Amino acid sequence: MPPQANCALPQGFQLDQYRIERQLSLGGFSIVYLANDAHGMPVAIKEYLPNSLALRKEGETEPQVTDEHRLAFRYGMKCFFEEGRALAKLMHPNVVRVLNFFRANGTVYMVMQFERGRTLHDYIRKHRGEVKEVLIRAVFARMLNGLREVHSHKLLHLDIKPANIYLRSDGTPVLLDFGAARQTLVSEQPVLKPMYTPGYAAPEQYERRDQLGPWTDIYSVGASLHACITGSPPPRADERLREDILQPLARTQAGRYSRQLLELTDWCLHLDPHQRPPSVYALQKALLQREHAAERPEHWFADLGTRLKSFIGRG
Amino acid sequence: MRFTIYQESRIGKRRSNQDRIAHCYSRDALLMIVADGMGGHLHGEVAAQIAVQRMTEQFQREARPTLPDPPLFLSRALDSAHHAILDDALDRQFPEAPRTTLVACVVQRGAAFWAHAGDSRLYLLRRGHLVTRTRDHSRTQLMIDQGLLLPEDAHHHPGRNRIYSCLGGNYTPQVEYSPRTPLRDGDLLALCSDGVWGATDDDGLVANLSAGVLSQAVPRVMDLAERNAGQSADNLSMVAMCWHDENAVGAASAESISTRTMDLDGFESRLDLSGTGSGAGGDLDEDDIERAIREINAAINKFDTQR
């Protein structure tokens, strides 16, 4: 029997110094609310509430944790703290900012800055197949700034996907929802299942979870680029391991985007981690190469021209 | 010194483990502690943790490698632990100071000295028989002493958890000290919380503890207690030590420790302070949660003040 879904706290609920507006999202591990702080400023509040371990019934405030799940619940809480610790250490314009952390209702809450805008996922859905290369490069190059900051703190995101890349009103991206903590959730406590999104998760996230590394996030970046370019993520990596039906974008999408962007995406999507870009920095550098950013695939001759120029220039 | 030592702490069926245990030894002195944070009061585990930490720290300052005066050490260390709990409660603005029971034992120059407050116990076993054990500072023990209650009924008496002496809290602890007790080869000292002795009787405890090596005997006693207590199992903790005469031939088992080769200022310690029971796999207790939240908010505020 699938676990019952947890009930969200109702609108108007006074949670510590915050007032709940509405539920933003519901995951297997947590519920995210939009709330207002004491000054009326909007914040996003993430509530630790693993579906498989704790149940909050309709009309109740405190979730019930059975004795048999108490240890696992506490263990998951430890992982939630890891996420909080990770984010608290990060102060970066392209990474969501944690504002507060507190205990209530028998569980714990993480308060984050609420950003106005929409997710890259929504943007792709609205502009399916028409996401401009300039925008892709601009968003990803900045988003990778945030990811580099994450990796420099020895953390992995592990759930990079367009739904977790938020575009502020001014177009700058913010990396949301840190799954870094989940990595530790998986190995020891089978009760808490690994979380990943099929299509965006790297092959090593399905099986060889001891082999996770920055290259794992790089695969997800590639899958997100794939979604921008084609409108959908590549086939699930576990299926690709059995039979790889993914055609190189450089072949299937040739002409629609610059060859360099397509090749770069294919590069990230290698099943073998060693074949992917060696670092986020390398990937970012490739995205920022000006001459390619300016490339217009429809001007094939112009492209040829720049190549010739560089050839001549070298001579 | 040569001895075998084993310690274990389990959560039982409780939400958190408020027991804290430790042992620590220099070349010539050994300290063992069991503290049982009082759950009916706020932050019992904090009191237990402070007490155990404070006492081991003090031991490491003074046992270099011999304690000048073991009873005096025990008296001062317990007093300092008591005040450390009160100070901490003041710092944290707790409405009242948390409480913990405590039993501590020092072994030095072949003799044991112990002290206790509350109902955590020390048992001394010799050749499979109980030589002595501490008497609880509890209402039931008082009633037994006054002939109002039979010892066999004490286990079920509702007042058995009511204790009148502890560290922390509002009153000065009434600490009871043992006389100097010389140890013989094979003597066994076991310190435990009421989660262990409350769910077994002395005969069962003695019989199970005396058979075989300590690393199996202690878990066996705890298994028994846990099984007896069933769904109501309290936190269970035990530190047990088997004394070996260094000159006795073949007396020492393979598990035994000899301190003869230790540095004069060296220490070995094992503190179970995280409150994790066996197999708990990194459980968090209340204190850990509070600490984690404080740390995270400190990290957040660090950035905020930079801005």
Image (cartoon, coloured by chain):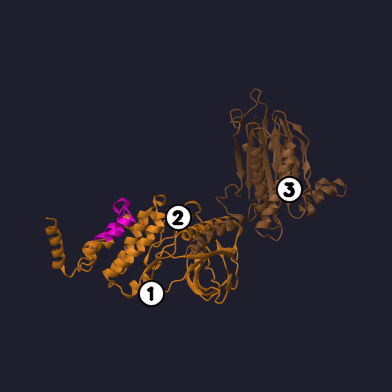
Chain colours: A orange, B brown
Give neighbour class at mark 1: few <14, some 14-19, many 20+ (Cα, 10 Å).
Answer: few
B159 in magenta: no
Of labels 2 and 1, earlier in sequence is 1
B118 is higher (above) or lower (below) than A63: above
Give neighbour class at mark 3: few <14, some 14-19, many 20+ (Cα, 10 Å).
Answer: many
Q: Nearer the viewer, residue B20 or B296?
A: B296
Quadrant housing the C terminus of chain A: bottom left
Give neighbour class at mark 2: few <14, some 14-19, many 20+ (Cα, 10 Å).
Answer: many
Asked if residue B207 lies left or right of residue A233, the reply is: right
Residue labelled with disc 2: A183
Marks 2, 1: nearer the viewer? 1
Element at label 1: loop
Q: Which residues are magenta?
A: A263-286
The residues tagged by marks 1 and 3 sit, at their Cα atoms, a distance apart of 64 Å
Q: Amino acid at mark 2?
A: Gln
Residues at discs 2 and 1 in contact (Cβ within 8 Å): no
Residue at image coords 63%, 31%:
B27
